[in-house]
Image (spheres, rainbow, N blue to C red):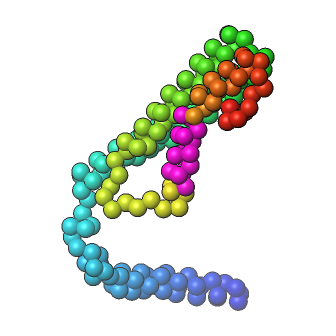
């Protein structure tokens, strides 16, 4: 009996309490103008939205190509001929290296060419990603030359040394 009386009290007062809170919240909530935002700042802009849509598409392609690029990169490393190289192994390795570099180049293009809204500042992980991308680009450009140096040293009967090692 006592539990049902408590239930009846809650059933009677909770809905009216919730309605009273909703009315109090809706009447006291400030408008955007009261918060200092002008009408032009709160309205959508088709040109800005188109720019953001293009940027989103290009950065999504950048991300997908970056993940896809892992496959030829690993295949290039796996087929590295080392000391036991013969012409066909070097050709396969070189072809995979060219494919890796081409995908890397396309990946970088979509990141660099993505339009950036005015006033956007890179923060946190994006700054690190861009710094590491510079290092990766230097490595991608240097690797074929270092590989050629190593091949020349190895084909002369020398132990691979210096920057090529």
Q: Quadrant of residue 140?
A: top right
Residue drawn at (21%, 70%), measured in percent from left and top?
39
- The kind of secondary structure the magenta stretch mainly shows is helix
Residue 74 magenta: no
Residue 38 vs 56, above or below: the answer is below
Residue 7 vs 110, above or below: the answer is below
Residue drawn at (64%, 87%), measured in percent from left and top?
6
Towards the viewer: 16 or 103 = 103
Image location (x, y in percent) of residue 102: 50, 27
Q: Does residue 103 appear left or right of residue 39 in this picture?
A: right
Towards the viewer: 27 or 131 = 131
Q: Which quadrant would the N terminus be assigned to in this image?
A: bottom right
Q: Does residue 40 appear left or right of residue 137 in this picture?
A: left
Task: Determine if residue 53 is in view.
Answer: no
Residue 62 vs 43, above or below: the answer is above
Q: Residue furthest left?
A: 40
Residue 133 magenta: yes
Image location (x, y in percent) of residue 162: 70, 35
Towards the viewer: 124 or 2 = 124
Residue drawn at (26%, 59%), measured in percent from left and top?
44
Image location (x, y in percent) of residue 29: 35, 82
| Range drawn in magenta | 128-141
Q: Which quadrant would the C terminus be assigned to in this image?
A: top right
Q: Does residue 103 appear left or right of residue 43 in this picture?
A: right
Q: Quadrant of residue 83?
A: top right
- Tally the numbered discs: 0
Residue drawn at (58%, 85%), measured in percent from left and top?
10
Towards the viewer: 62 or 2 = 62
Image location (x, y in percent) of residue 57: 40, 42
């Amino acid at each position: 009996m006592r539990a049902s009386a408590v239930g009846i009290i809650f059933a009677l007062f909770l809905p009216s309490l919730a309605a009273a809170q909703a009315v109090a919240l809706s009447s006291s909530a400030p408008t955007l103008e009261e918060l200092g935002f002008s009408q032009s700042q709160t309205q959508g802009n088709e040109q800005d939205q188109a720019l953001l849509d293009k940027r989103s598409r290009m950065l999504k392609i950048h991300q997908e190509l970056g993940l896809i690029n892992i496959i030829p990169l690993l295949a290039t490393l796996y087929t590295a001929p080392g000391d036991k190289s013969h012409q066909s192994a070097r050709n396969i390795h070189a072809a995979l290296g060219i494919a890796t570099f081409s995908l890397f180049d396309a990946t970088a293009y979509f990141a660099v060419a993505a339009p950036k809204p005015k006033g956007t500042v890179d923060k946190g992980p994006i700054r690190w990603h861009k710094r590491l991308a510079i290092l990766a680009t230097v490595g991608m450009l240097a690797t074929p030359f270092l590989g050629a140096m190593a091949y020349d040293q190895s084909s002369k009967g020398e132990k691979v040394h210096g920057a090529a090692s």
